[in-house]
Amino acid sequence: LIYRASRDGWQASNFHSKCDNQGPTLTIIHTTGDYIFGGYCDTPWSSAGGYKSSSKAFLFTIKCYSGILPTKMRLRPNNFSYAVCHNGSYGPTFGGGHDICISDMANSNSK
């Protein structure tokens, strides 16, 4: 475990100081509502900004509000170039429409 917000701090800069250039990562999000979901990124995170392409990145749910069974969601081939967004102002961000976006100080905001 290279980063845990409750241990290492909720600032996006803390995420990037621990996770940038670390290789493939699996992001697991456990909410206060007891939902568990996340994403896999095979490209190393960076603070440089911009989208990164991947044919291997995916999202997943383990326990979600809609009650669906655990699910792995792959990217559509036409969306490979928007697999993840690297931005020093945000934590891990998946998808061109920010399907999952962990904002700075996510424990104290509603963005």
Image (tube, rainbow, N blue to C red):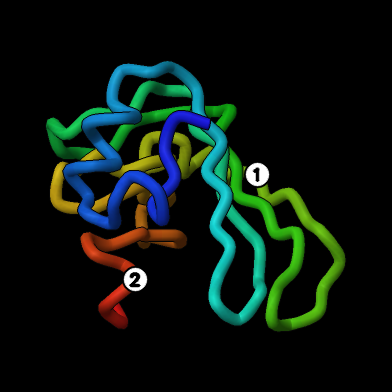
Residue 80 against residue 104 in the figure, above or below: above
Which disc number belongs to residue 74?
1
**For the residue carrying disc 1, how many other residues have a C-alpha within 10 Å: few (<14), some (14-19), or many (20+)?**
some
In the image shown, does 80 or 60 lie closer to the viewer? Answer: 60
Kindly identify the amino acid type of the residue bearing the numbered disc 2. Asn
Instruction: State the image quarter where residue 75 is shown.
Output: top right
Query: What residue sits right under mark 2 in the picture?
Result: 107
Residue at figure coordinates x 36%, y 60% from the top left: 101
Residue 35 against residue 36 in the figure, above or below: below
**For the residue carrying disc 2, how many other residues have a C-alpha within 10 Å: few (<14), some (14-19), or many (20+)?**
some
Q: Position of residue 35 (x, y in %)?
A: 65, 71
In the image shown, does 102 or 78 lie closer to the viewer? Answer: 102
- First along the sequence among labels 1 and 2: 1
Front: mark 1 or 2: 2
Kindly identify the amino acid type of the residue bearing the numbered disc 1. Arg
Residue at figure coordinates x 78%, y 56% from the top left: 71
Residue 108 against residue 21 in the figure, above or below: below
Instruction: State the image quarter where residue 88 is shown.
Output: top left
| Residues at marks 1 and 2 touching, judged by CB atoms closer than 8 Å | no
Left or right: where does residue 32 sit relative to residue 16? Answer: right
Q: Position of residue 21 (x, y in %)?
A: 31, 18
